Amino acid sequence: MNRYLLIAACLSAAFAGWSNAQTPSGKDILPPGPWVVTQMPDSAQWTIDYTYADTRKHRKALVKLAGDARPTHVTIVKTGAIRHEIREMERGLKSEFWAMGDMMVERRSNAPKLFAYTSGPKDSEFPEFGWISQTNFTGRKIVDGSDCLVFQQQIDPLQITYPATYAAQQKDYQRDATEVKSDTPTVLAIALVDAKTRLPVSLQAGPELRRYAFLPPPAAMLSVPDEFAAAAKEAKARVDAATKPLSAP
C-alpha cells in the first residue's frame, strides 16, 4: 500500500476510535425531563434520613442555615389535601406538622403551644432538587439495583436547605439589578434520581446526605386531630379577617 494511503488509513481509524469514545453510551444519555417528580400521588408516604459528616469549614454555615438542631429523620404521609409530617431532630427534639389545604399547624417538642400559619401551594414535593438540569447531568449509576440519573454541581447550600428562601432572594436580586452575594461557602451537590420512577434516591450537599425511601400508600385517609384542626380554623379566621376588603360606606 502506498505510504501516504497507509498513513491516511491509520489517521482515519484513530479518529473513528476517538469519536466513538467521545459519544456517550446509551446508558449515559439523559432521557427527556422532568427528571424529578413534582407531585406525589394523593395517597403516599415516604421518609428522608439525614446524616452529617461535619467539617469545621462548613459547620458554622450549616448551623446558620438550619438552626442549632438539624433534622435526622422525616416521615411524610399525605391523603388528598391532608398532609402529616414528623421531623425528628438532633438533641432529641421533634416537630409535628398537619397541613390542611393552605393552612399548616406545627407542634414543637420544646414549645408549649401550637403554631399555625398559611403554607401556600406547593409547587414541588421535592424543591431541594430544583437546581438539577441538563447541563449538570453527569451520567448514570446503579444503586441498590436501580438505574439512577446523576446530577452534580457546586451550589449555595441555601438552594437545598431553604429552596423557597433562595428563590425569593434571586428574584429580589434580579428586580433590584444587584449582584448576587452569599456569606455561606458553596458546596458540591450530587443528586441521584431513579431513572424509571423519577423519584429521589439521595442528595449529597457537602457534608449533608439525604436518603429517600418510598413506602406503600397509607391504608386509610388521614384524620386531623381536633386540637390541630381547631388551631387551623382559628388561624384561618384571623387571616380572612385581616384580608377581607373594607365594605363600601
Image: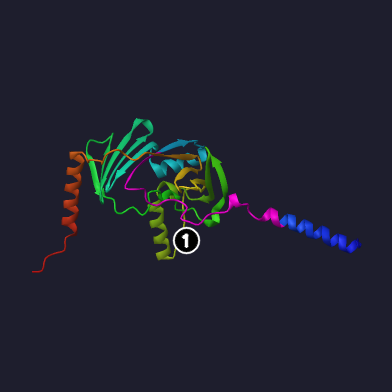
Residue 144 in percent (x, y) is at: 52, 37
Q: Is residue 202 left or right of residue 81?
A: right
The answer to which quarter of the image holds residue 141 is top right
- Density class for disc 1 (Cα within 10 Å; few <14, some 14-19, many ≥20) is few
The residue that disc 1 covers is 179
- Taking the spot 43% from the left edge, 49% from the top edge, the residue there is 128
Q: Is residue 45 left or right of residue 12?
A: left
The answer to which quarter of the image holds residue 75 is top left
Q: Quadrant of the C terminus?
A: bottom left
Q: Is residue 116 left or right of residue 125?
A: left
Residue ranking furthest to the top: 92
Query: In the rendered image of this protein, does residue 187 appear above or below residue 94?
Result: below
Indicate how the structure is coloured in the image. rainbow
- Looking at the rendered structure, the kind of residue marked 1 is Glu
Residue 248 in percent (x, y) is at: 10, 69
Q: Answer whether residue 241 is magenta in the image.
A: no
- Taking the spot 19% from the left edge, 59% from the top edge, the residue there is 243
Number of marks in picture? 1
Closest to the observer: 97 or 38?
Answer: 38
Q: Is residue 24 left or right of residue 144?
A: right
Q: Give, as a single range, the part of the protein colored magenta.
A: 19-47
Residue 77 in percent (x, y) is at: 32, 41
Query: In the rendered image of this protein, does residue 177 appear above or below residue 34?
Result: below
Q: Answer whether residue 28 is magenta in the image.
A: yes
Residue ranking furthest to the right: 2
Residue 107 in percent (x, y) is at: 26, 38
**Element marked by disc 1:** loop
- Taking the spot 41% from the left edge, 45% from the top edge, the residue there is 65
Closest to the observer: 180 or 134?
Answer: 134
- Taking the spot 52% from the left edge, 55% from the top edge, the residue there is 31
